[in-house]
Amino acid sequence: MFPVKQHWLCKALGCYDCCIRCIGAVPYPSLVATLLCYAGTALFCGCGHEALAQTEVLVKTHFAREPKDYEVMASFIKYFQFVIYGLASFFFLYGILLLAEGFYATSAVKQTFGEFRSTQCGRCLSLTFVIVTYILAFIWLAVFAFSAIPVFFLFNMEHTCHTINIQAESSPVSLQNWICIDARQFGLLPWDVMPGKSCGMTLAAICKTSEFHSTYDLYIATFAGAGVNLLALILYLVPTTYNYAVLRFLGRKGIR
């Protein structure tokens, strides 16, 4: 009986050792960065798509009269929504590639799966991921800054409405003329569009509509998603750069 128990004990210990080795081969920084990338991309693309659609409704309802007045903005929104589809697909595939590269580099560095061979192709592939991720991080930094513009516009609009509501008790008549929000100043409409702006209590009424609040919330979520995605790209840079440095070091040591 004892040899049988000893056999199962050894088998269990071998299974445990195998599990520990597999867990140790998981590239946790790349895994966390991938999850953040997917979450940020989902927020940015999903909420951004809906925010653009709500923006068109908000502008054409309260700041423009004729369809030709906002046709340029409508075309831009349509094209940018297609760009969003492309971004979602790209980051989904790129996240898988970076995670796979993380598994390869981690197992290679730790020599988990047999004898390790540092090939020139593998080092070149790791360097390519490092360069592409650096470029994407700089590009996405600009996207992150750009996504703050609609948040600033709607925040300014909400603050203006708050000012109108506070001062309406003392001077409700004069507010109709000098407290305004002009959509043309933010490039949403051409300068020859009339009215192109909303003033006074009319503007305060716009801020109470459901489309204004939904658009504002969606743009905040889009801005947050861009920030999460930027953080994911920065986190990607750490393990990819480290893995490439270690692979190159092992290559110089003659492990090929």
Image (spheres, grey):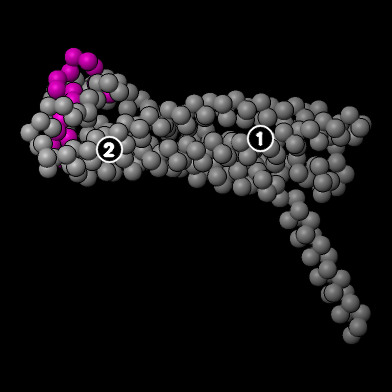
Q: Looking at the picture, how far across and down is residue 94, in whole percent?
A: 58, 35
> Dot 1: what SS?
helix
Query: Left or right: where does residue 250 sit relative to residue 225?
Result: right
Give 6 or 60, whichever is nearer the viewer. 60
Quarter placement of the C terminus = top right
Quarter placement of the N terminus = bottom right
Q: The magenta stretch spans which residues?
A: 188-205
Tag shown at residue 159: 2
Q: How many marks?
A: 2
Image quarter of residue 95: top right
Question: Residue at left 17%, top 39%?
Answer: 167
Structural crowding at the residue carrying mark 1, measured as other residues with C-alpha within 10 Å and reported as few (<14), some (14–19) or many (≥20) = many
Q: Are the residues tagged 1 and 2 within 8 Å (C-beta)?
A: no
- Amino acid carrying mark 1 in the image: Leu
Image quarter of residue 132: top right
Marked residue nearer the N-terminal end (1 or 2): 2
Please tell me whether residue 129 belongs to the stretch shown in magenta: no
Q: Is residue 206 visible?
A: no
Tag shown at residue 237: 1
Q: Looking at the picture, how far across and down is residue 80, in whole percent?
A: 37, 27
Please tell me whether residue 202 belongs to the stretch shown in magenta: yes
- Amino acid carrying mark 2 in the image: His
